[in-house]
Amino acid sequence: MQVASQQPLIKRLVVVGLGLIGSSFAKGVREAGLAEEVIGVDLNEQSCQRAVELGIVDRCSTQLLETCRDVDVLMLAVPVLALSKLLKSLAPLDLSQTIITDAGSVKGHLLKAAQEAYGYLPKRLVPGHPIAGSERSGVEAANADLFKHHKVILTPHAATDPEALQCIQALWQGLGADVESMSVEQHDLVLAATSHLPHLLAFGLVDSLAKRSENLEIFRYAAGGFRDFTRIAGSDPLMWHDIFLANREAVLQQLDQFRGDLDALRNAIAEGDGHHLLGVFTRARAAREHFSTILAQRAYVENMLDNDLIFLAKPGGRVNGTIRVPGDKSISHRTIMLGSLAEGVTEVDGFLEGEDALATIQAFRDMGVVIEGPVDGRVVIHGVGLHGLQAPPGPIYVGNSGTTMRLLSGILAAQSFDSILTGDASLSKRPMNRVAKPLRDMGAVIETAAEGRPPMTIRGGQRLTGMHYEMPMASAQVKSCLLLAGLYAGGETAVTEPAPTRDHTERMLRGFGYPVEVHGATAKLESNHKLTGTRIEVPADISSAAFFMVAASIAEDSELVLEHVGINPTRTGVIDILRLMGADLSLERVREVGGELVADIRVRSAKLKGIDIPLELVPLAIDEFPVLFIAAACAEGRTVLRGAEELRVKESDRIQVMVDGLTTLGINAKGTPDGIIIEGGQMGGGEVWAHGDHRIAMSFSVAALRANAPIRIHDSVHVATSFPNFLALCKQVGMRVEPEGQV
Ligand code: S3P
């Protein structure tokens, strides 16, 4: 029965070839009412009959030429090599008003066949390829939903009529497919790598094992791995025979490259080179996980930014319990960087498995460093020494992570190879001249996009010279970048900061046995020393703990213990500021772990009051201001922040974005060029925007504890960059924040 759910887009569709794809397309178009009439053509009379019986087509014929009259769209769903003959037999017909499309896996071959048949490329030819299928075949397997949420790649040629392209696009979209377009050449190369090569390997492996005399034995013991790897060897042999012959050049190119890699694996096994094996396996595992998230559309890749993840924070609640927030982001980045440049192995526990820190791992893997994990916060880095990094295969993508880009640029400026650093849309707006300029003064060759924005293109093979740099702004990223460049620069590199900033780089360099001198505001080192692998325990991140410090302070009847929090004196501005506001915070079990102070922090509800935030505390609480503004909104009286213009160039303009959100919630908040003025008051609910900034999304989640209506926080996807289990911990302590749709 036909259940038309859409307006017909065309009058008559003819589908030639009623295999799985052809009959599924016909059935889908017919059921959705996208064509007034759907006609099938198949050489097999029985298939024709079944197709009508099963409601796949309105009618069906074995006679191609007779059927192809007054056709709006002609879908050629035959095996790839049959296309050539088919197009030749169609060529004498007047099909000038007909759009011809196909569903084959090879596009270059189709264009060649069309060129041969017509002597030119018909304007109404729209090559297409649905990335969907099943091991089942024929009309009996027809499935109107086969293409739903699957990709269809269209590869228009230079003269393809835009109207024809649009019509085919609309038909596929009507079947629920995601339509993309790319060039014919790119399509054939990409598919050779991602589809054709794996099929070749699966067919080849099964045959190779099956033809051995002991095959019965082998197959009897072939369990999960064999089954998973060879599932696709059950595909249609004729169809795949056609694909390999039609896409010869691209497949050979991919196959030869893979043979090289396979030989390298063989050599590694033969020579007992476990390092090579571990490198391949750890990289593959990470890549596979990354692909899985892309396939599930959960990755941090750029197009994710289009997906608006909304947090819905319900008003009220208490905050109680004992939790440990994830590892420190700044320290986690540095363990990978210094561990990679060290000689020997570095073992890390408590590593932050957030996307920013994972981006740093990926960057060093791209440069040949073998890094195991992270598994439950444990990472093992097989250091390559200061001069052991290799050229990355392409641009290094660091996602949302400003720390990765700025610190890495210092290391890359001194390498023998060229490199390019790129980031996501938010990072691409952030200033890089603050590192590019002093690095150039040391002899680096660096280009940026307009106004010093990423990407950064760094030329290798430069000799850097140490210098004494007076930083114009209080930035630990700039200081760290220059100290890292200083590991390679001739002579001495010294950096003086205008106010104290986090000193994890200096501390950790020493932990790796590298001498660093610190006198007052100046940190200084010389090249020609080495780093030696070590063990590091990363404390919980005080910047993540800050959300819960404010939460337990502002919510009634609350008492929360935050365990094992890093309280490095260059990071504790948030504690000092909250105490000045009247918060009840106590530090318990203060101890030193691996050169960093840690403590358990007990927080009880308190009545907060507005304050003038002391200037000297600003750099020591730089990442915690968004949530401190929430504390200020809940405090009695006025809070004034000055000297914090840096907040305008973080993952978002944190002053403007917080002013906008607080104003929406009914709080009197005013931005100034270098700070904010907030009058405490009663918060209402409403719609606020995090602008893809993790700390803004988490701050407004905390605000709901004192709001009198729900707060919907748009653009919250980036919380995973620094605090992947934020929502789970919220739930654990009694806060009611959930992604919308799962409430
Ligand atoms: C960081 C330094 C700070 C901070 C950032 C991490 C670091 O940036 O905001 O989240 O790890 O060095 P600036 O140095 O730019 O202030």
Image (cartoon, helix red, strand yellow):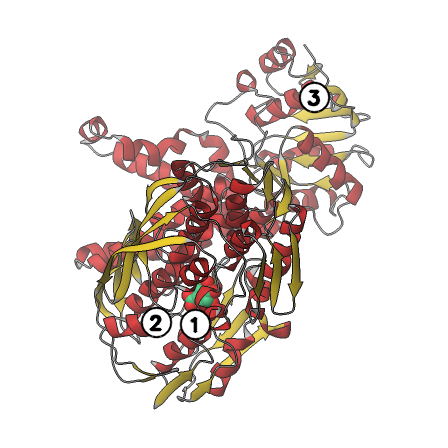
Q: Which label lies toward us, 2 or 3?
A: 2
Residue 32's disc is 3
Mark 1 neighbour class, 10 Å CA radius: few under 14, some 14 to 19, many 20 or more: many
| Residue 685 drawn above or below residue 284 | above
Mark 2 C-beta closer than 8 Å to ligand 1: yes
Work out how far the residue at label 1 is from the one at label 3, CA to CA, in angstroms: 59 Å
Which structural element holds mark 1? helix
Residue underneath mark 1: 476
Q: Earlier in the sequence, mark 1 or mark 3?
A: 3
Question: What's the mark number on residue 505?
Answer: 2
Whether ligand 1 has any atom under 8 Å from the Cβ at mark 3 is answered as no
Residue type highlighted by circle 2 = Thr
- Closer to the chain start, of discs 1 and 2, is 1
Q: Is mark 1 within 8 Å of ligand 1?
A: yes
Q: Position of residue 84 (x, y in %)?
A: 63, 38
Marks 1/2 in contact by CB < 8 Å: the verdict is yes
Name the foreground residue: 631 vs 394.
631
Left or right of residue 457: residue 103 = right
- Relative image position of residue 238 (x, y in whole percent): 48, 31
Q: Which quadrant of the frame does ligand 1 lie within?
A: bottom left
Q: Secondary structure at mark 3?
A: helix
**Mark pair 2, 3: CA separation:** 61 Å
* Residue at 33% across, 44% down: 323
Q: In this rendering, is residue 655 above or below 160?
A: below
Mark 3: amino acid: Ala
Residue 216 position, x and y percent, is 20, 27
Q: Nearer the viewer, residue 495 or 15?
A: 495
Label 1 to label 2, Cα distance in Å?
A: 9 Å
Could you say where residue 555 lies in the image, as x and y percent from the top left? 47, 42
